[in-house]
Image: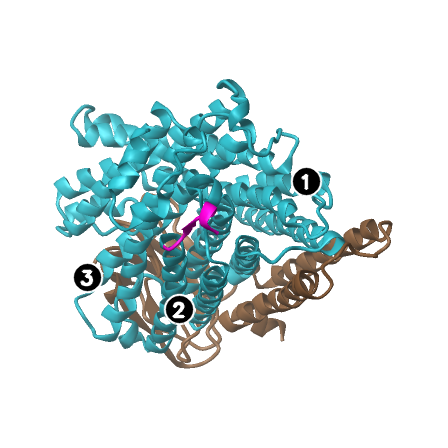
Chain colours: A brown, B cyan
């Protein structure tokens, strides 16, 4: 469940709905009721408002904290740092992006063996997004030229297949053509 | 009769909508705001047509250059000469009526000229080949010249336009508002609804212009030497520090992110100012001014450093500590939003609300604003950002927040319209416009978010090849619905009737 929420775009969509649906329900219901049904001053005890205010804020804070705390183990900076610290048998891949193609030191990887992607851009801002064969984004990296340090991320492919690479940062009139393919065996 | 009133009267079609009432003695707070607001709607029509053109270009597989031209112009027209200028027009009238200060003079005229001449120059540059999107994507403008995508002349023209727009937003408008708040002479005959800075309806205005001024200064400090070097006034060797992509990108997003936050604070403040006027039991007070002010302060403090969320995926060039900070601050703005939701709902629950079109527009815009706020928080989570950044999700968020704020300003304008023009609007037409705008806007938002969730990159000219045309068709359908809502709104302004005849 958490894997789906934090590693898939549709998981993000679900998180969005989780917050939006209750808001829509209560906001529209209250406004409709007080605009069309019972428009006069409310008979609610004035002393109840501070209590409701406290409950509302506490609920919001609790949900915000929960969603973010649960996401920590899925944050690529956290997982990348942990895997590099742990060490192991990595495949190291250097990526250089320029308008409108990638130079990739190795395009073929093994299932289950972690890959360290180190990517740089040499002209303008580019992206390096790797797509699962089913179309969802596994991860994306922003590559800004002029930085000494390459954008770096460790990813372990769990299924064989052809993984499309696309630039997600607008980089000029052939931006849509900036694509590549990685093979996982 | 003021120059602004004369200009309005000479403009075909739109002039009828914004013709100022010259008999009520309020021209000093009405004429320039009306001209600024009218011009913003001219830009909206351009932006809307370009917005609808994009899915059509994709559907028929037309020239990709045409798509990128529309993309750049649509974004630029929507964000600056429409949404920002609409805010300036209505807020200057509001400030004038609340403080009894004139909303005209050289600064206002200069704002108007810089904003619109700047936007026109940028438009000409884009038509001449300069396609950088409204976020500039520096150093793309320079790389584009080096790679032959556009000429140096178009780069200079485009940057000159952007510089004028920035001057109007970062200096001229904030200084004018600060002048009205603290310095210029008060005229009792101009006071329509007196307010002080203790009032949430005015406090947000002060906070917003300070954000624009303060977060815009670093960008102007970097952009000015670059422009001077392009003009040949400074040697290129003197501006190498400014053209470093990381320098430009950071000062750009510190401003661009806070520009949106400032606009949000400004409109939330206007909502706080307008809602009490529509309470059913006649009370003219919010549930709690303290809670409302707290929301504005939380929005200010959290938004200032939440811009880091634009750079999470640069790890480790953006140290992870800044990512976590950006994550926490971005969700902190949600807390400010939660305070605002409670203030609005508690006020309405306590006193009831009169469902007049202006108020419904404001509340409908607020609903879209909150829905969009959730999309922003989701993509500002570090884990989720690595799956969404650079997709239609982020494009959809930027578009939706502009749509939400614009609808709220259109509601505030609806409220002030009779005072500005001496004419009243048709409630039925007003409500119909809200319906189409609201469902079009919300539908567009979900179409963009679905595109982002399914990995659809933003700003690409090949939706068909990527298999994303279904999303494109949804965008077109909801875009048409939204456009119809805008047409109804403008038709209502155009067919407004003299109040004395009602």
Residue range in magenta is B495-502
Left or right relative to A133: residue B151? left
Q: Quadrant of the N terminus of chain A?
A: bottom right
* Residue A82 found in image quarter: bottom right
Percent position (x, y) of residue A104? 29, 63
Return the disc, 2 or 1, that comes first in the chain's sequence: 1
Disc marking residue B481: 2
Mark 2 Cα-neighbour bin, 10 Å: few <14, some 14–19, many ≥20: many
Residue A114: say if magenta.
Answer: no
Left or right relative to B332: residue B53? left
Disc marking residue B66: 3
In this rendering, do the residues under marks 3 and 2 share a single chain? yes
State the residue at coordinates (34%, 68%).
A165
Return the disc, 1 or 3, that comes first in the chain's sequence: 3
- Dot 3: chain letter: B
Mark 1 highlights which residue?
Answer: B294
Q: Is any atom of residue A140 visible in this view?
A: yes
Choose between A146 and B76: the one closer to the eye: B76
């Amino acid at each position: 469940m958490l894997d789906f929420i934090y590693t898939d775009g549709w998981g993000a969509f679900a998180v969005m709905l989780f917050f939006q649906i209750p808001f829509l329900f209560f906001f529209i219901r209250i406004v409709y009721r007080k605009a069309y049904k019972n428009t006069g001053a409310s008979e609610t005890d004035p002393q109840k408002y501070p209590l409701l205010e406290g409950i509302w804020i506490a609920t919001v804070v609790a949900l915000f904290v929960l969603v973010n705390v649960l996401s920590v183990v899925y944050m690529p900076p956290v997982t990348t740092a942990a895997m590099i610290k742990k060490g192991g048998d990595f495949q190291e891949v250097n990526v250089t992006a320029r308008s409108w193609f990638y130079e990739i030191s190795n395009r073929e990887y093994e299932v289950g063996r972690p890959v360290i992607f180190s990517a740089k851009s040499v002209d303008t801002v580019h992206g390096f997004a790797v797509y699962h064969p089913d179309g969802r984004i596994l991860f994306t990296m922003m590559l800004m030229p002029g930085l000494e340090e390459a954008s770096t991320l460790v990813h372990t492919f769990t299924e064989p297949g052809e993984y499309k690479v696309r630039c997600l940062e607008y980089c000029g009139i052939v931006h849509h053509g900036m694509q590549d393919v990685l093979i996982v065996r | 009769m003021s120059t602004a009133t004369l200009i309005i009267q000479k403009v075909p079609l739109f002039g009828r909508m914004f013709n100022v009432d010259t008999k009520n003695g309020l021209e000093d707070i009405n004429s320039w705001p009306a001209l600024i607001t009218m011009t913003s709607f001219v830009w909206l029509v351009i932006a809307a047509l370009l917005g609808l053109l994009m899915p059509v270009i994709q559907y028929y597989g037309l020239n990709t250059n045409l798509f990128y031209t529309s993309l750049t112009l649509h974004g630029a027209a929507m964000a600056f000469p429409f949404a920002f200028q609409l805010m300036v027009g209505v807020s200057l009238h509001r400030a004038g009526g609340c403080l009894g200060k004139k909303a005209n003079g050289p600064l206002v005229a200069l704002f108007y000229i810089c904003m619109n001449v700047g936007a026109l120059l940028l438009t000409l540059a884009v038509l001449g080949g300069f396609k950088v999107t409204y976020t500039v994507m520096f150093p793309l403008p320079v790389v584009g010249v080096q790679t032959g995508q556009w000429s140096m002349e178009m780069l200079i023209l485009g940057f000159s336009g952007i510089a004028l727009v920035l001057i109007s937003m970062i200096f001229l408008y904030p200084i004018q508002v600060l002048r009205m708040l603290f310095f210029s002479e008060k005229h009792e005959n101009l006071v329509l609804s007196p307010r002080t800075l203790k009032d949430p309806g005015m406090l947000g205005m002060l906070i917003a212009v300070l954000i624009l001024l303060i977060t815009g200064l670093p960008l102007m400090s970097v952009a000015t030497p670059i422009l001077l070097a392009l003009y040949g006034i400074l040697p290129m060797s003197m501006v190498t520090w400014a053209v470093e992509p990381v320098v430009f990108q950071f000062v750009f997003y510190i401003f661009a992110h806070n520009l949106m936050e400032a606009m949000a604070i400004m409109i939330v403040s206007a909502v706080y100012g307008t809602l009490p006027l529509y309470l059913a039991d006649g009370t003219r007070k919010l549930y709690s001014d303290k809670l409302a002010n707290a929301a504005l302060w939380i929005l200010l403090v959290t938004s200032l450093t939440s811009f880091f969320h634009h750079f999470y995926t640069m790890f480790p060039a953006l140290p992870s500590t800044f990512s976590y900070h950006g994550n926490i601050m971005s969700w902190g703005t949600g807390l400010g939003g939660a305070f605002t939701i409670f203030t609005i709902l508690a006020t309405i629950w306590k006193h009831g609300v009169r469902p007049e079109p202006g108020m419904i527009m404001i509340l409908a815009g607020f609903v879209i604003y909150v829905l969009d706020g959730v999309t922003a928080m989701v993509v500002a989570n570090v884990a989720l950002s690595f799956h969404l950044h650079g997709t239609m999700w982020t494009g959809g968020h930027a578009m939706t927040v502009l749509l939400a704020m614009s609808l709220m300003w259109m509601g505030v304008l609806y409220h002030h319209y009779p005072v500005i023009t001496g004419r009243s609007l048709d409630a039925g037409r007003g409500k119909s416009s809200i319906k189409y705008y609201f469902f079009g806007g919300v539908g567009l938002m979900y179409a963009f978010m679905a595109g982002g969730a399914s990995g659809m990159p933003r700003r690409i000219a090949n939706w068909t090849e990527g298999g994303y045309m279904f999303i494109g068709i949804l965008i077109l359908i909801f875009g048409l619905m939204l456009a119809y809502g805008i047409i109804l709104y403008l038709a209502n302004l155009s067919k407004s009737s003299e109040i004395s005849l009602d």
